[in-house]
Amino acid sequence: MRFPILGVGLMLLASAAAANDLPELTVMTYDSFVADWGPGPAVEEAFEKTCECDLKFVSAGDGAALLARIRLEGTRSETDVVLGLDTNLTAEAASTGLFAPHGLGVPEFDLPVAWDDDTFLPYDWGYFAFVHETALQPAPGSLRDLADSDLQVVIQDPRSSTPGLGLLLWAKAAFGDDAPAFWSDMADNIVTVTPGWSEAYGMFLEGEADMVLSYTTSPAYHLIAEGDDSKKAASFAEGHYMQIEVAGKLAATDQPELADRFLRFMMSDGFQNIIPTTNWMYPAVVPETGLPEGYETLIEPKASLLFSAKEAQSLRGAALDEWLTALSQ
Amino acid sequence: MADRAQPIGPGGAFGVAVAAAIPFVILVTTGAILWVAEPGEGLGGADLAALRFTLWQALLSALISVSLAVPVARALARQVFWGRNLLVTLLGAPFLLPVIVAIFGLLAVFGRGGVLNAALTGLGLEPVSIYGLHGVVLAHVFFNLPLATRLILQGWQDIPSERFRLAATLGMDARAVNRHLEHPMLRQVVPSATLVIFVLCTTSFAVALTLGGGPKATTVELAIYQAVRFEFDLSRAAMLSLVQLMITVVVALLALRLVRQAGFRPGIDRQRRRWDGGTGIIRAQDGVVLTGVTVFLLLPITLVLLRGVAEIPGLPGVVWASALRSLGVALCSTILVVVMSVAMSVAATRLGRFSRWVETAGLMAVAASPLVLGTGLFVLVHPIIDPGRLALPVTALVNALVTLPFALRAILPACKTIEDDFGRLATSLNLTGWARLRLLVLPRLRRPIWFSAGLAAALSMGDLGVIALFADPDGATLPLQVYRLMGAYRMDDAAGASVLLLLLSFTLFWVFDRRARDVEP
């Protein structure tokens, strides 16, 4: 922008004008969703074509930090919809009483599990995995191998990030009561713990680590968007923990109908089409056109792991303490 | 000056009120923290690890900064060369440098993709990582080595020049000068310099936030932030705030016991000249030390400038909006600092022997850590209003409180001198109250006032602390915006925004400080 200050002024004017004309729907989400290359811009355009509204995305760190933000804002929140929690957090989120039941008819989801949550609705899913350069040979074949290796990895903080929390539960699902021993062995492999996925993936791309905690679908980004097949997700013998990402409507919203429309739109092709090539996850409802070319090259986990929302809620506190204790030594 | 040389008056009463407000704010925030904290839960292993890490990294940072500063200060003290004054001025710059900008620069030098690792891998060596304990200590040394150098250089300059002349007459070489003059001085100066830096490093937040390596490298201040922002666990944040308060209080008490004034009797203040810096080896040695420290300080900033200058015109609107927010915060905080410090100084001079109370109130602000004050205020306002709405006023207030002690150190002595020199004359002319302030005091305080304003503006502009605790997603200040851009891996924008922040901070200081220099002495 050539005249930045003028630009800011114009933007403020523009947003003020828009606010006067159209109802505003505020969706709080994680950082990478609203990045230029993320789904945010395309979703906004597609939804605004039909909704006669102004869709505003607000980002507040990574997925788990969203819940802290919502609890902080409480019933005062100006947010209408929260998009970006996952099933590891839904029970905790529902127990705050800040979310309203969606009350919508749901389509047939293409999820590996049956969906019966009456508050949150899924929009995409995937498997957590450690991503590395193809040049890294041999790549570790299990979480245990990784912990025993000298490889340097970047992971995310389970308190602020859903992938971080996913790894915590992945270790719990794979090792049970031996998870603390796994974390002790991992401690010397961890370059740093970032607050969110974006920071970690950025560091990995910058060459700060050999591997990064991400998804089995992440190599698709490099392959499809950049024509680069040098990134790979390591397939682990313990199986891969699954993530189902969800959105929910806040009870205190002043735009309940608009929020419902957004949630319905989220489960339709208009939204689901955007997901595989912007959020780089499997769509919750596979659109008519199917998955984009390139997805067939991705690894299929040998086994998929997932705790139910209730189990995740009851495991989280103790698992977090174990993690903190093991990594702070 | 006699006790109660003049009536306290409305201006003085205002100053007393301000002075009283500081302990009041600190007590109220601490009270709020105590109210919320649930001591029953106790401190977990991770909290103790944060406490241990805070003390350990502060100790390492202080020891390394000071041990590196001794040769630098010695070289500066005994060598005369072109650019020496410039170098001494440069040593003052990191104090005003926004932390996030320095970190961006340090990453460009010491990160995996940085200059150093490029050289190391070029030589076939293993690359080093900047994250974790050594990264935190590195950043702290970057900020505090210059400070330590200036403190120790002051020690050298306090050695009367006659002693060096005498040493030269007796034919002492560098080693003998060291034993008889420098070593005794260092024994007095080094402990207090170490302690000052230790104190500064115990409240480190932004460095640990960006360069910490997870739970292993978390300071208490960072843990407070995580408790609020990651878990929204206010009682845990409050417990950690109590831990931080205890650290500051214990260290402050230690400082009072340990720091004593240096004991050289004044000389007759003649021009300083050194006779022991002449031999080739010593000159070469000093040259290496000074070149090393100059490169260490300048390289990161140069790399930020090189990468970022061209990005400024293309910065997105949110960056400019956050820059405007930061300027607003900096100016409000500056006005607060000036009004508070002038009012307190006037009150202190009018109070006569009770003036110590006012000064102590000002010093209390040193002990208050920004994140602890922030947590207290957060706990207080949260039930009433969304803290995000108060992010900017709270940031301005906390920044002002943190800068206040520095401003008081500049303004209070000047105020006392004015009262000593002209007070009786003014009283005999019946010049009191507002007229006295306007006609006598303020015109003569212009110099320290403008200097303090520059300091307050630059420090507040670059602050990344309380704002991180309070800000809502679209209310960031410029330093927070830089942090977020780095997090979103938009490194070009982050570099551009860093340069913008750097320019704004130093321009603010320069604009105000130039007015201070313009004032006729």
Image (tube, coloured by chain):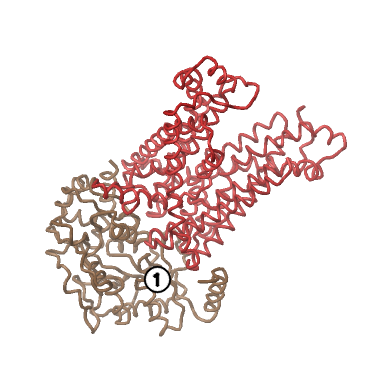
Chain colours: A brown, B red
| Residue holding disc 1 | A81
Q: Residue furthest top?
A: B170
Instruction: Using the image, determine if residue A83 lies above or below residue B279.
Output: below
Point out residue B455 in the picture as x, y percentages from the top left corner. Answer: 59, 46
Q: Quadrant of the C terminus of chain B?
A: top right
When the figure is inspected, residue B103 is found, relative to residue B193, above or below; the finding is: below
Residue A56, given in percent of the width and then of the height, sits at 44, 73
Disc 1 chain ID:
A
Task: Please count the marks in the image.
Answer: 1
Q: Position of residue B150 (x, y in %)?
A: 52, 35
Residue lying furthest right: B429
Q: Residue furthest front?
A: B280
Q: Residue A28: which quarter of the image?
A: bottom left
Circle 1 packing at 10 Å, graded few (<14), some (14-19), many (20+), is many
Q: Is residue A65 above or below residue B403?
A: below
Query: Going 44% across and 29% down the picture, which residue do you hit?
Result: B280
Nearer-the-camera pick, B485 or A305: B485
Q: Secondary structure at mark 1?
A: strand
Left/right placement of residue A176 relative to residue B26 reads left
The residue lying toward the viewer, choosing from B206 and A119, is B206
Disc 1 residue type? Val
Camera-side residue of A40 and A117:
A40
Rendered-image quadrant of the N terminus of chain B:
top right
Looking at the image, residue A125 sits to the left or right of residue B145; the answer is left
- Tell me where residue B182 appears, x and y as whole percent: 49, 22
